[in-house]
Amino acid sequence: MQKTIKRKPLIFATAIVLSLVTIIGATFAWFTASDSVKNRLATKDALANVHIQETFVPPDDWKPNQTITKEVAVIDSGSAPALVRVTFAEELTINLPAVGEIDAFTAAKETAKQKPLLFDATAYPHAPGDDWVKLTDSPNAAIGGISLAATYPIEVYAKYVPKSTPTPPGGSVDSYAFIAWSPISISGSDFDGKLQAVDFVQTWNNVTKVLTLSDIKYMTYQGEKTTTADWKTDKPAACNRSVAEAKMEALGAAPAGSYPGHIELNYDKVNAAITTDEWYYNPADGYFYYIGLVEPGVPTATMLKSLLLNENADAYYSNMTYDLIVNMEAIQHTKDAVDAEWAIADTALKTAIHALCES
């Protein structure tokens, strides 16, 4: 959260100072305030306690086609009305897709911000006596004489279903299935004791019952890419899509077309036309303007309503963090304050804001 407040004292002790107010008061005798919230809020202002009112519970795992409530309004708990505008900043971080490497995961890779693609072995019970049996390069009579052609630097397990098994039916021939992973052993690492997924080419000889593995690759995420967007400088023409998402492709983080706008921003009282007591997005400066005064104790109409990761989001979104930061500015409702602090170029918008100001 960031907050700045600046104001000129409104009571002066001498006639000399009062004369100065006559000269410069039209330019400087107003308050301004700003607030920024990143999933929390808190601010204080003796003139107009203007701050963001937000309803947001971040999900543990944001899934495609899932809408997350993020309601944003502005409220004034002080004693003076104010004019407000809001803009966004974004931060998007992704893990680059996992690729096969010839070396297993190490502490050096972790230091380089790489991450292993973890393997979940819960579906492959492999303790002694379980269905999946660890293979060695010697024939294993317990599972039909299966053996490995060589010793490999990964753990290989097999499941054997003989044709004579009555329940469930074993079929007319013996069946075999294989799985492999690489245990991670890095003291002090978050990944210590976990399993890294591996890829390999498998050759099975059904006569000799020998399994040969080749082209073994350790699946590793290649690091992170982060991009940011500030709507004040990026000035998106349309306000219903993430700007940071559109910038991710430029980093070479994914093939073209991987980030076509799957993060959607859904609004409530944001109108395409300048409408009293609603919000208006001005693409010329990247701000949402509230076309009304924020009166003490009365919240504005809700601006942002929810965020959606749409159903077309692909694998490039499976390891993503996304921050949407709401930044608010409030000023005293005078024309001089508006012209000096906001400098609105849009004539119709400026006229509408001026109409809310004190005479």
Image: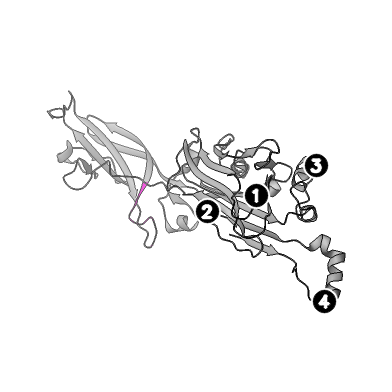
Q: Secondary structure at mark 2?
A: loop
Q: CA distance from mark 1 to mark 4?
A: 39 Å
Q: Residue reaching furthest top?
A: 172
Q: Is residue 272 above or below residue 291?
A: above
Magenta segment range?
188-196
Going from the N terminus, do you reach mark 3 or mark 1 first? 1
User: On the rendered structure, is 127 left or right of 119?
Assistant: left
Give the Cα separation between the discs numbered 3 and 2: 34 Å
* Residue 213, percent from left and from top: 33, 39
Distance from disc 3 to disc 1, alpha carbons, whole Å, reads 19 Å
Instruction: Give the residue type that dot 2 points to.
Output: Asn
In the rendered structure, does residue 51 fall within the stretch colored magenta? Answer: no
Type of residue at label 4? Thr
Q: Decide which of 171, 205 is in the foreground and name it.
A: 171
Question: Which residue is at a point 31% across and 37% down the rendered structure image?
Answer: 212
Mark 1 or mark 4: whose residue is earlier in sequence: 4
- From the viewer's perspective, is residue 340 above or below residue 257? below
Of marks 3 and 2, the one in the foreground:
3
Q: Split into 4 quadrants, where in the image is the N terminus?
A: bottom right
Q: Could you give the CA–CA distance between mark 4 and mark 2, rounded to whole angstroms?
A: 46 Å
For the residues carrying marks 1 and 4, which lies nearer the camera in this image? 4
- Tell me which numbered mark, 4 or 2, is placed earlier along the sequence: 4
**Which label sits on residue 39?**
2
Disc on res. 347 = 3
Mark 2 or mark 1: whose residue is earlier in sequence? 2
